[in-house]
Image (tube, helix red, strand yellow):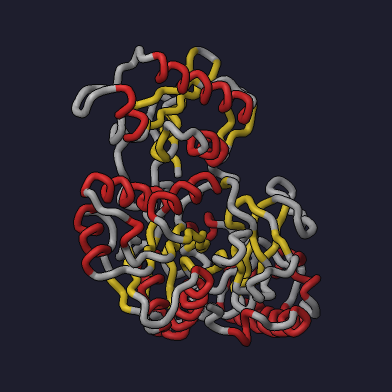
């Protein structure tokens, strides 16, 4: 379903005209109302009147997350604080939290792009949407909630945790759609098996998963275990929250960016140089309609590329390819760049293993050591041990799986890695984003995204 056909199928020349008009407006507005941008524009010698085409966008300076922290809490507002009807904030685990503000129109815009996202996934008015994203300062839960209500859906605001209760609600209330992180979707599937619930007999048709990186292999696993179409939704609090882009169920080949609201670029992470279509680099976004806190050329840190080829769903908007990692989450192991998504791709492809894993980084003398811990799935464990018995660590089948997957990891990553296959439910289950990296190289544990 295409929720807003006029905008989602707008001819690209008309879309560019709309983008340019809105870009001029937002640049003039922040130059007049936000001292930070007025100062930054002056530093690079660019005035709002210098923006005459979309090709002038790279003349404008970047905005970084550190700028939001440095101007905490209200320093980047383009409206009086009294005009803001909503505030969200990051967790602040990497420093000062970032505060994001919304006017009434911003909340309406957010609901609009979420309704488009639900339509991309195959959602329809009248559906029951089970929303297991976290509510509160995190933008996920409330973002999906308002968009689903705008579409005319019945929303179940389950939030996170209490997974058995979640399963009961999905069954009893007849959920057609499921919204949560992909790792939590696997936890829901695992709990369904434990409770004897057959997903094939449920009303579930589609799942909208995001807030953490995931791979095609994990998509296949989720779809197989929950019997639904799984699509990737993309967003970040600083821009608006979820709903910046979403995959369509027809193609599942990149998330459609809603370009009438968000203007994308891809740049070289090191030099900041704008890269051509199809090239992989850091995604940069400019908000075209945000009132409370517009951002100019915001460096997301997410590594992706842009595909302008027509999509068979009929939408004309550019698609961003699946996030392969973050520029600040890339691991450097013995001089080799490693993204957690590469590890996940290997693990989920092994039929004996589950999607629950973590990467433990330690140091032996001057050398880094990477150990990947992953759970065996229930089916494999039942082959090796009677119910209730521990996983036999010396079983030949377990040794074979461990060595086979370890070799695949080394070939894929080009770096030495150890593999530990653990019993099911050995790794802590998150209620929000999965903790994929435990970095102990500095003597102090730190959790990676």
14 vs 64, nearest the viewer:
14
- Report how many numbered discs are placed on residues in the image: 0
Tell me where residue 32 appears, x and y as whole percent. 61, 81
Tell me where residue 389 appears, x and y as whole percent. 21, 23
* Residue sitting at x 45%, y 46%: 221
20 vs 235, nearest the viewer:
235
* Residue sitting at x 45%, y 27%: 372
Quadrant including the C terminus:
top left
Residue 272 visible at all: yes
Q: In this view, does 302 lie to the left or right of 422?
A: right
Q: Quadrant of residue 88?
A: bottom left
Question: Farthest front residue?
Answer: 201
Q: Is residue 235 left or right of residue 167?
A: right
Tell me where residue 364 appears, x and y as whole percent. 48, 14
Residue 50 visible at all: no
Q: In this view, does 53 lie to the left or right of 402?
A: right
274 vs 35, nearest the viewer:
274
Q: In this view, does 187 lie to the left or right of 27?
A: left
Q: Quadrant of residue 423?
A: top left
* Residue sitting at x 56%, y 44%: 328
Q: Up-down: is 232 above or below 315?
A: above
Q: Up-down: is 277 above or below 422?
A: below
* Residue sitting at x 38%, y 29%: 444
Tell me where residue 416 appears, x and y as whole percent. 57, 20
Q: In which quarter of the image is residue 50?
A: bottom right
């Amino acid at each position: 379903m295409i929720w807003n056909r006029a905008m989602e199928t707008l001819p690209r020349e008309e879309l560019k005209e709309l983008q340019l008009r809105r870009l001029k407006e937002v640049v003039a507005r922040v130059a007049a109302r936000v001292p930070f941008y007025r100062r930054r524009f002056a530093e690079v010698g660019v005035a709002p009147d210098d923006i005459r085409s979309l090709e002038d966008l790279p003349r404008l300076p970047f905005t970084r997350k550190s700028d939001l922290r440095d101007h905490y809490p209200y320093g980047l507002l383009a409206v009086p604080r009294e005009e803001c009807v909503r505030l969200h904030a990051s967790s602040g685990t990497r420093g000062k939290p970032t505060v994001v503000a919304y006017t009434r129109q911003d909340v309406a815009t957010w609901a609009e792009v979420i309704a488009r996202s639900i339509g991309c996934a195959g959602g329809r008015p009248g559906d029951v949407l089970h929303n297991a994203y976290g509510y509160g300062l995190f933008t996920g839960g409330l973002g999906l909630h308002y968009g689903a209500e705008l579409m005319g859906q019945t929303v179940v605001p389950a939030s996170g945790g209490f997974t058995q209760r979640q399963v009961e609600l999905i069954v009893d209330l007849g959920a057609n759609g499921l919204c949560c992180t992909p790792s939590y979707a696997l936890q829901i599937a695992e709990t369904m098996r434990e409770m004897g619930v057959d997903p094939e007999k449920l009303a579930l048709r589609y799942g909208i998963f995001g807030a953490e990186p995931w791979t095609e292999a994990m998509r296949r696993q989720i779809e197989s275990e929950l019997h639904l179409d799984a699509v990737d939704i993309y967003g970040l609090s600083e821009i608006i929250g979820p709903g910046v882009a979403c995959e369509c169920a027809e193609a599942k080949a990149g998330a459609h960016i809603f370009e009438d609201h968000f203007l994308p670029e891809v740049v070289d992470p090191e030099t900041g140089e704008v890269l051509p279509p199809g090239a992989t680099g850091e995604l940069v976004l400019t908000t075209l309609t945000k009132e409370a806190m517009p951002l100019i050329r915001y460096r997301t840190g997410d590594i992706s590329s842009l595909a302008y080829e027509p999509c068979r769903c009929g939408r004309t908007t550019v698609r961003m390819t699946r996030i392969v990692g973050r520029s600040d989450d890339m691991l450097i192991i013995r001089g080799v760049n490693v993204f957690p998504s590469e590890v996940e791709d290997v693990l989920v492809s092994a039929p004996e293993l589950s999607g629950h894993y973590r990467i433990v980084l330690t140091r032996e003398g001057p050398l880094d050591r990477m150990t990947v811990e992953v759970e065996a799935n229930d089916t494999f464990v039942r082959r090796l041990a009677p119910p209730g018995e521990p996983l036999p660590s010396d079983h030949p089948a377990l040794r074979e799986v461990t060595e086979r997957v370890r070799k695949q990891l080394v070939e894929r990553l080009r770096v030495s890695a150890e593999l530990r296959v653990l019993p099911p439910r050995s790794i802590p289950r998150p209620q929000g984003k999965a903790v994929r990296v435990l970095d102990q190289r500095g003597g102090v544990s730190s959790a990676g995204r």
